[in-house]
Amino acid sequence: MVGLQTLFYKEVLRFGNVLLQTLIAPIVTSLLYLLVFGHVFEGRVQVFSGVGYTAFLIPGLIMMSLIQNSFANSSSSLIQSKVTGNLVFILLPPLSHLEFLLAYVLSASLRGMLVGAGVYIVGSLFVALPVQHPWFILLFAFLSSAVLGAMGVIAGIWAEKFDQLAGFQNFIIIPLSFLSGVFYSIHSLPEFWQTLSRFNPFFYMIDGFRYGFFGVSDVPPSTSLLIVGLALAAFTVVTLLMLKAGYKLRD
């Protein structure tokens, strides 16, 4: 376990040394979303009975920040190591493929959950959030950050340049996170877009996470948990196969 612990520690130090960029900046960004959308729609839009729009919005912002930062942590670390040429020092030690993956995924999950906790604390200054099912909150936060951590490893392995990684994030991660019910319930959408939203795994992450606060959701939380768990299993298998094959890592 020494190799796993060391790589995990190295990754935590990497984002810990630039907290202004990795933690403070995304929290401030979420605060701006909260101020703008909360001011505009509070009192005008009610998604769940008895739940104000600002309260509805905060769990979505927490999960959106968690998703984006978990992905950014593992993907940016790998692409930096590839571009600077120091990836060889991570590949040379006798680390198993699973240890390699776990170190990156766990460090990405830690950063994502720290950002999410920061957004929750800031949001709580504006409105008191009920907590109906705390274990659902923690479970969906961890599983979702792990999924995006694994996706980040895949993107970091695949990308050869920073602009390729930026394209992956700008055209896949950000659109899927924005169109996953952060700012609205899918039941407010036309039938076609409701159906399309159900193919977005990020929707189930946010909907299940929001259930932990309010006890209500657009789909059953068990369905959301199953889909998020299957997504984690699928991305884990894909990542391990890429690592085993040495795809774009042994060049």
Image (cartoon, rainbow, N blue to C red):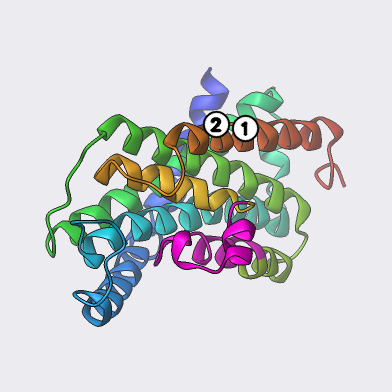
Question: Which type of secondary structure does the marked residue at label 1 adopt?
Answer: helix
Task: For label 1, count other residues whose C-alpha is less than 10 Å away and answer few (under 14), some (14-19) or many (20+).
Answer: some
Q: Nearer the viewer, residue 210 or 83?
A: 210
Confirm or deny contact between disc 1 and disc 2 (CB under 8 A): yes
| Amino acid under disc 2 | Leu
| Amino acid under disc 1 | Leu
Foreground disc of the pair 1, 2:
2
Q: Residue at x 40, y 53 (%)?
A: 63
Instruction: Tell me, for residue 54, which label it has, or none.
Output: none
Residue 156 locus on image (x, y percent): 68, 52
Residue 10 visible in the displayed image: no
Q: Would residue 45 appear left or right of 79 to someone viewing this image?
A: left
Task: For label 2, count other residues whose C-alpha is less than 10 Å away and answer few (under 14), some (14-19) or many (20+).
Answer: few
Q: Nearer the viewer, residue 77 or 92?
A: 77
Question: What residue is disc 2 on?
Answer: 226
Does residue 204 sit above or below 133 in this rendering? Answer: below
Residue 3 locus on image (x, y percent): 57, 24
* Residue numbers of the magenta segment: 172-198
Question: Which type of secondary structure does the marked residue at label 2 adopt?
Answer: helix
* Marks 1 and 2, how far apart at CA: 6 Å
